[in-house]
Every structure is written in structure tokens, then in C-alpha cells.
Image (cartoon, helix red, strand yellow):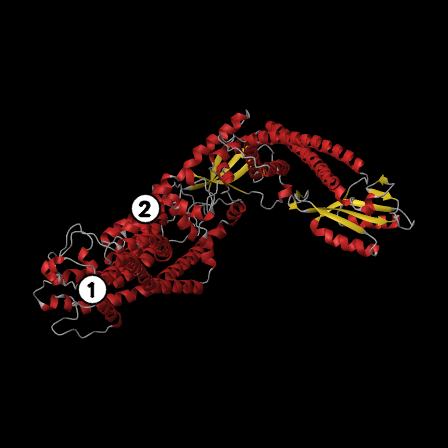
Amino acid sequence: MGDLFRSESMALCQMFIQPEAAYSSLAELGESGCVQFRDLNAQVSAFQRKFVSEVRRCDELERKIRYIENELRKDDINITEVLHEPPPPYPREIIDLEAQLEVVEMEIRELAGNTVNLKANYHGLLELRLMLEKANDFFADTEVIKMTSHRFSDAVEYAPPLPGQQQRGQLGFVAGVINLERFFSLERMLWRISRGNVFIKRSDVDDTSPDLNTGNQVPKAIFVAFFQGDELKQRIKKVCAGYHVSLYPCPSSAAERQEMLSDVRIRIEDLQLVLNQSEDHRNRILVAAAKNLPYWSVMVTKMKAIYHTLNFFNMDVSSNWLIGEGWIPTRDLPVVRNALARGSSKVNSTVSSFLNVIETNEQPPTFYRTNKFTRAYQNLIDAYGLCTYHEVNPALYGCITFPFLFAVMFGDLGHGFILLLIGLYMVWKEEKLSQIKGEIFNIFFVGRYIILLMGLFAMYTGFVYNDIFSKSFNIFGSAWHADSIPVPNGTFSGGELIMLDPLNSLNDVYAYGMDPLWSVAENKIIFFNAYKMKLSIIFGLLHMAFGLILSLVNFVHFKQYARIFLDFLPQLLFLMFLFGYLVFLMFLKWVKYSGRATEQVLTPGCAPSILILFINMLLFGNTEPKEGCKEYMFEYQKIVQIIIVVLAVLCIPWMLLGNPLLEARKRKQRVLTVATNGIANEAFEDHNNAVASAPAKPTASTHGHHESDEDEPMSEIYIKQAIHTIEYVLSTISHTASYLRLWALSLAHAQLSDVLWKMLIHVPISFPMPFGGIMLGILFTPWQFFTISILVIIEGLSAFLHTLRLHWVEFMSKFYDGVGYAFQPFSFKAILNGSYED
């Protein structure tokens, strides 16, 4: 948890690597995942870099791997998981990998091409078999069966004219197979081009066959078109070609058709055997490839990442070293040095690679070492804005404040227990559930520890509220006199409401939480309204004050001591003079006024309204008290309030003018310093020119924003400070009021739970048995459904979003800049998981 307080210290380093050891050194750095490299060739085109040919080579290997993966998916072959992640292949191993992928790809492509041709022939023979089987029906009519002579050639048969017909030519026919949806259009077209001199007979195929192009099942029809004349024959064949008709030879003799049919069946059996053998061979190749493909994919991905990162490096003038720069966590500097040493030793390099830490004015990236528990809270903060380097991280404190503020709005022991069970289940089955791929589910799964703590804290606040599914439980007994309860023997039938008077309480303070008698009190809503509203103001003040204290921690760390007196102190005083005093009045009222007080002025009836007192304090007004009561709670309260308001108002010009006046003074001092040093600069002009011509080394003490501040006019500085001051003064009021959502959502959640109980559970209980028991069994299921869907899921999501807003706006605005950028090291693990962004 200590790693979350501030981002880790980063160092900008320069590494010198010999070219022969560059690949192995980057392989070691990729496994360690500690360096975020900078592109030193940003002005160079991607096609002009040193290792562009190697990157293209990896792209070609990735293309082959994708092709093989697609073929595996087509055949529904499962790809084995990578049990032991292989290292990146070294240059001498890349040739073997290329050869293996080339052989597998070529075999698959050859088999795919042969299979397409075999299947085309197979489907053609199937259609020919169907046509021959249907041909007997086509030639069964008298005018066709009496043909005495015929000639068989190119799918067209010629026969002598029918008996009784004039000898004007021979009658021919064309047989083929067509998609059923195209047949009717073909029939009309043939009728038009022949002017009705075509006789067509059709037979639909019962079993549909797959289309070779799409693979979908398409119904087909077998037809025979009878015609007369060679010219009409050519027209018919052209039309059939346009409609993608498969024409087949069909003898007009039954004996020849039977002989041809038996031959086709034999060829179909032989072709089916060849297809089965081809499928088996293809399956063996793909199964063997599926075992190695994940390892090949990992190796090629790592190899491409290495060459892509090497393109960030520069070559020195002597071409003996590759020079790279990158950000490294200070803690990991020994790890990087060891990785460079291992990379040099693997290739037996004569000179080891080395690392230099360089000074810079640039803002380093932000990096936190998170675990399964803290990663979800860090993601919530990063969604608003990444922490500035070395800024206090709100995620560390959000681990407790987030579930606690959620529980204040979601305080119910039963509903919190349901959330706790959901969180426990996801934590218990995290290895199994982590395999589920779903964007929405992954959001909840990553936040499983948040859900777990939210349920645990909701159970705690539900125990404090004495609320479990809108009912109360009696553990410590009641702190009220039995005589004050207007019910015989203190027994309730379920519909009575009583008025609780503080005068009848046995003890001033209940043992723990809420007295169970409040659940049947007539003034329950009034009491809970005041109780939860005041609690929300108290929690809001503590939360915002803690945010201001964290701003003090930032100022001390960045050595901005002037801002402690010009920003932190007036902001804290303004908050405490107004709302700190308001919280003080709340506690004073709780302590001072009691139902057992002997003086009338100290009875609850004379207790002044805190809200009215606060408004009168700001407006310098007053309200006439009741007879026998006092307007104020202590002596000199009016004078104290006037002083507090005046001091709070004085804090506004303090915040408004402090920083601009300090900046104006700094500029004036710099001008005087330059003028004073001008004479000395003239005396040593030659020396200064020589120094100025040398490259300047930046120091860690300089800040990059100084130059921009110097160039900015003073008028803009005054305007920005005025905006900042107005924003803080107004937000102090609005943010405090925003914490009232703790009260509003808590009260709404309790009332909605109570309404659901009375509508679905209380009604059947009031009926006599067994009718009441039957109704209870029927209505329990909808009560269970609405409790989980509305009160747990919808209300829980609403409370979660309100809690997130309280942290993002009300809390983090007091100290959080959030203008950093993430540390994204060169890591094989991140690249393979898809979380690496380049």
C-alpha cells in the first residue's frame, strides 16, 4: 500500500548497446518490462529506419499465422494454450521458423485448391446422377419415346421428327441443372427467344445441395428443353450460360442412360474416397499446426516488438554503438543493468552494454505498482485523470473512503450481505471467472474487491442504522420507558405507531446504533432526517478538510512553501470559519439540550435551528425566540459569529492577491538581479560568449514552468487567480451541499425498502392462515426479485456513481491536478495481453 502514496521515482537513462548484442539485450529488457523507450527518430519516416526490413519480415510471418488460424477456425479445431511462454527467436532461428510456416501454408493452400476442384467435380457428378435418374420421367411421353434415331454430342441430342409431323428437321434437346429461383425467369426467356417453339420439362430436386461459392443450401431443379434447329440450339445455350445453368450430356436411350448412370455412380464413390482422404490429410496437418501455432505467434510477436523498438535507437558517429533513451523506475535500475549484461553475454560481446542516468527538466511518467486489490481503485482515479508525477495519489485513501461513503448511502445489513456474497464469490472463483471474455462483466470482475468492501461497509452502516430489509433487530433492548409505549404489555400487532419523547428515555445514549423502537415511531422520519442530514455535513467537512491537508503534503514535497501561506492556509480557514463552525454548533446542540433538563431554556423545545442560526450569521440578522427561550446557544455567540464571518471574508482577498503579488515581486527581483549583473557581464563578455556557445546541461532544480510564467503578462495571472478564488469560494458552499446526497440517498433507500416490504410481505402476513401462508409463498419470489434488481443493483449502481462524484469533484479538487501521463514500459507481457499502447 505504501507504493500508492506517490508515484515511483523515475530516471531518464541513456543506454549504449553494441549492434550484435542489440537483439538479445532488447529481448531481456522486454522480459523484465522496466523501460519506457523514447523515439529518437521521430523525424525519420517509418520506411527509412534501420530495422524496417526485419519488421516487414515479421509482418509476413504474422500474415501466415493469421491464415493458418483462419483455416483452423473453419475446421473448428481448438488451438492449444501456451503453458510455457517461449522466448523470442534469435536471428539464426528465424530462418527455421520461416521455413516451417512456409511449408504449412503451402500444404494448406495446395490442399484447399485441390479440395475446391474435387468438390466441384463431386457436385457436378451428383447433379449428373440426379439428372440421369430423373431422365426416365422426361422421355416417358409418347411423342418423345417414339424417336427412332438420335445422335449424342455435347449435351445436345437430335432425333428424327415425330410420327405425323412434317419432315422439316430433327428434334433436339438440352438437359441441365439450375437453381430453382432462376428457373422461372429462364423459362420465360427461352419462350421469348424461341417464340414459343421450346418445350421444357422440369423436376425439382428433393434434397438441397450446398452452393460451391457461398456454402448455403440452395434448392435446385432439373430440366430438359426440346427444340428444333441448330440456330435455336445456340441461342438456348447462350441463355443457359447467362443463367449459370450446368448443362450435362443425357442420352435419349434408356439403356445408354442406365449404363452412363452406373458409370457415374462408380466415379462418385471413387471421388468420395479421394475427398475423405484429402480431408483426413488436411486435418492431420491442421492438428499438428494447432499444437505449435500459439508458440509461433508468441515468438513472432516478441520478435516484431524487438525490431520495432530498435527503430527508436540511434547509431553513433562511429557506428559501433546503438544509443537509446528511456524512463526507468529508480528501483529497477539494477534490474535493467543486469538485463543488459545478460544480453551482451549471450552473444559473447567483447564490450558490455552500459547505462547512464541523465538529468532533464521533462516531467517523468507516472507509475504505481498495483496488485489485484489496489488495481481497481487506481483505475477509478485514472479514469478521471492520471496523477501528476510525485503527486499524492487519492487511490490510497479511496480504498477506505470510497466504500465507506457508499455504505452511508446504502446502509442496510441485508442488502450489504448480498453485495458481500457477490464479492466473495468473484474473489473465490477469480481464476475461473477471469476466463470469461465480456467488456461489461470484466468491469465488475476487476472491481470485485471494491464490491467486497462495499458490501462489508454497508453491513456495518446497516448495523448502525439498525436496518435489515427495512426491519429492525433487538439486541441491546430498548432505552425507553415501558410506560411511554401506548400498547398493552408492549406488544405490537403490526399497525400501531407511537410518538417517542426524549423525556421517556432510560439512558441518554443507546448502547450501539439505533434503538429498535424507532422502527415503529410516528416521528421516525423526522428523527432520521435530522440525524442523517447532520451526519452527511460532518462527513463532508471531514472529507474536504482531509483533501486540503493532502494539498499541504504536496506543497511541502514540491517545496512550494509560499503556497502553504497563500493557498492552503486561507482555504482551510475559510472552510473552517463557515462550515467548521456549523459542525461545532451541531455537536453543541446534541450535548447541551436534553429532555431531562430542569431549565426550560435547555429543553429540546427551546433548541434553536442550526440552519436558521447559520443563515442569520451570514446575513447578520436575528430571529425572535420562543417565550422562555434564547436565540443563541451560548453567551457572546453573536459577537463570535460576526468575527468569524469577517475573518472568512478577509480570506478571500488573501487568496485573490497573494500569489499575483508574490509573482510580481519575484519578477522585480529578477529584473534588479539582471541589471546588477550587467556590468560584470560586460567585463567578462568574451568568457560568457564561450560558455554560451557550449551545450547547456539542465539541472534538476530548474522547473519547466518558470519560462512560461515569465512570459505570461501579469494581467492574465490576476485573472487566473480571480477565477481560482471565485471557484473555490463558490465550490466550498456547493461541495458542502453536495454531500447532502449521503442523506438523501440513504433516506430514499430505506423508504423504498420499507415500501417494498409492506406491499409484498407485510400484507400476506396480516391475513389468517393458511391463506396468508399461501399468499406469502406467492409474493416472496417477486419481493426477492425486486430486492435484488432494484434495491441492490440499481440503487447500488446509483450510490456507486454518487460516491464516485464525491471523490472526483468534492474531494480531489482540493489537491489533485491529474495532468500526468502513464508509464508504459516495453514489456512482452503487456504486448501479448493487448494492454501495451504504442
Q: Is residue 703 left or right of 46 when viewed as pictured? A: left
x then y, percent, for residue 792: 34, 53
User: How many numbered markers are drawn?
Assistant: 2
The answer to whether residue 581 is seen in the rendering is no
Q: CA distance from mark 2 to mark 1?
A: 32 Å
Residue on which the image places disc 2: 420
Residue 625 location, quadrant: bottom left
First-in-chain label (2 vs 1): 2
Q: Nearer the viewer, residue 248 or 476?
A: 248
Q: Residue at x 42, y 53 (%)?
A: 384
Q: Is residue 788 left or right of 185 when viewed as pictured? A: left
- For label 1, the crowd category at 10 Å Cα-Cα, with few meaning under 14, some 14 to 19 and many 20 or more, is some
Query: For the residue marked with disc 1, what is the amino acid?
Result: Asn
Label of residue 142 in the image: none
Query: For the residue marked with disc 2, what is the amino acid?
Result: Leu
Element under disc 2: helix
